Structures are given as C-alpha cells and as structure tokens.
Image (cartoon, grey):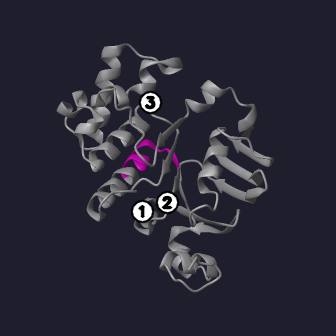
C-alpha cells in the first residue's frame, strides 16, 4: 500500500535519508526502529507529503504522494503524535472530533460529538471526559484522547509517532494493546516509529531498522531476535558495543 523507493532527503549539508527502500503491505503494521536522529520522523513526514524528498519515489496505492490531491490524500490518514498535540483551549470532544468539525469531512456538530464520545469509549474513557480540558487529564488519558482523535474519521492508514513516550510501563502496555486491537479491528495499515521494544513486540507485524539513512534490516517481527543482523541485534538488546557508535 505504501512504498518508498530509493528515497533521499537532506537539509543543507546534512543528509538524513540516503536511499530508503521500504514496502508496507495493506492491512499490516510496520514499526520503524532506530536511534535518535536516524531519520524516522523525516521518513514519516515524507510519506505524508509534509516535506518533499530530494529524490526517489513514495507511492500510496501506486500513486506518487507528491502529486496527490492534498485534501483527499490526507483524509485517508490518522495520526497519533508523540506529545499528544492536543489543543489546550478545546474540550476533549472537540479535540477528538477536530477533523469532523471542519474541512471535507465536516459533520453536524451534534453528530461529531456523538462520534467523539463513541471513540472515547473505544479507548476506555467515559463520556464525562468529553467536556473536560486536556490539562485536567493525566498523561495516559491524554494519550488515549490522541488515539481517539487518530481513529475518529475511520482512516485507512494510521501513523503512530513514539506512542508510549512519557508513560509508565503499565500505561505503555495498555496503549500498546489498544493500538494493536484498534488496528486489527479497523483493518488499517499502520506505520509506527518508536524506541520502545515492548511497543515493537506488541504492535508490529513487520519491523524495519533505520540507521544512517538506510534500512539495514526489514522482516517479520517473529524473525527480529534471530535476524543475525549486527545493527538490529545491538539495538534491540541495548548493547553499548557493536557497529552502532555510541557517544561516550
């Protein structure tokens, strides 16, 4: 469904992506792992068309993403942002229904609210949360609101940017389970970037290891521990020694 072919992207003299090749089949969950600054977020933004690659191609269902009608293209996506990215001045239900209150997906206000409350229920939040403001919620609840917003418009494709950042291990586990359940339930295609190996094992069908701007290894999550790839092996076990240089 999503295919990156020899994608390069640099900023000034800093080359971030150096020839990324990656295929994400429809209805599967791909998790991209790699150290900070390896280009995971840049790759995601290129797929969304938020930044244009310098060379190479990115296609969605065979169509070049840089040539797609923006509104129709973005309507196919949902996104859970790393920091939650909730609007402080809006009550929870309006955060969840943000896309349903404007643009091409616009619904009547009462209908948008009903959908928001249903999506909040789906992520384990009670209806009384709908009229609260983000500042009144815990970090875990804010993350659930972000997840409810990501699925509010029933997208075909959902991106998760570090979905468990800032959460304790128990809440991280809850969010991972929710993401997996929802992706399977919706039949969505998912792309996640994360450092959290518990998230990888909970969410992924397939894993890709991005290092120094290229995919070093990709394959089913079941083969991750026996890949024999030194980069992947060092990363998933958190070893200081190996081909990935650490700053000391």
Which residue is painted at 38% across and 42% down in the image?
147
Q: Name the residue under label 2.
A: 194
Q: Nearer the viewer, residue 16 or 112?
A: 16
Q: Mark 1 points at which residue?
A: 199
* Whether residue 247 is visible: yes
Q: Is residue 181 left or right of residue 106?
A: left
Which residue is painted at 59% across and 52% down in the image?
41
Which residue is painted at 48% across and 41% down in the image?
79
Q: Main secondary structure of the magenta part?
A: helix
Q: Earlier in the sequence, mark 3 or mark 1?
A: 3
Where is 142 relative to 106, above or below? below
Q: Which is closer to the viewer, label 2 or label 1?
A: 2
Q: Where is residue 232 in the image (x, y as percent from the top left)?
A: 59, 75
Q: Which is closer to the viewer, label 3 or label 1?
A: 1
Q: Mark 3 points at which residue?
A: 153
Q: What stretch is highlighted in magenta?
A: 181-190
**Mark 3: which secondary structure?**
loop
- Total marks shown come to 3
Q: Where is residue 182 in the image (x, y as percent from the top left)?
A: 38, 46
Q: Position of residue 143 (x, y in %)?
A: 34, 46
Neighbour tally class for label 2: few under 14, some 14-19, many 20 plus, Cα within 10 Å = many
Tell me how far mark 2 sits from mark 1, CA to CA: 7 Å
**Mark 2: which secondary structure?**
loop
Which residue is painted at 46% across and 55% down in the image?
162
Q: In this view, does 235 lie to the left or right of 91?
A: right
Q: Which of marks 2 and 3 is nearer the N terminus?
A: 3
Neighbour tally class for label 1: few under 14, some 14-19, many 20 plus, Cα within 10 Å = many
Q: Which of 38 and 124 is in front in this view?
A: 38
Furthest toward the top, the residue is 108
Furthest toward the bottom, the residue is 241
């Amino acid at each position: 469904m999503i295919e990156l072919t020899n994608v390069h992207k640099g900023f000034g003299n800093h080359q971030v992506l150096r020839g990324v090749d990656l295929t994400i089949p429809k209805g599967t969950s791909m998790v991209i792992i790699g150290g900070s600054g390896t280009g995971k977020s840049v790759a995601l933004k290129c797929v969304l068309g938020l930044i244009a690659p310098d060379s190479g191609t990115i296609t969605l269902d065979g169509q070049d993403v840089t040539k797609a009608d923006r509104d129709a293209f973005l309507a196919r996506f949902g996104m859970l942002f790393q920091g939650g990215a909730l609007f402080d001045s809006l009550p929870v239900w309006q955060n969840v229904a943000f896309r349903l209150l404007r643009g091409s997906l616009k619904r009547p206000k009462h209908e948008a609210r009903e959908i928001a409350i249903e999506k909040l229920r789906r992520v384990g939040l009670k209806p009384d949360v709908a009229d609260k403001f983000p500042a009144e919620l815990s970090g875990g609840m804010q993350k659930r609101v972000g997840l409810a917003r990501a699925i509010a418009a029933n997208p075909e494709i959902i991106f998760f940017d570090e979905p468990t950042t800032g959460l304790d291990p128990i809440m991280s586990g809850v969010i991972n389970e929710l993401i997996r359940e929802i992706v399977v339930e919706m039949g969505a295609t998912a792309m996640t970037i994360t450092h959290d190996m518990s998230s990888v094992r909970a969410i992924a069908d397939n894993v890709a290891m991005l290092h120094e701007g290229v995919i070093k290894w990709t394959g089913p999550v079941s083969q991750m521990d026996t890949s024999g790839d030194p980069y992947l092996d060092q990363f998933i076990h958190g070893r200081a020694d190996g081909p990935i240089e650490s700053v000391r």
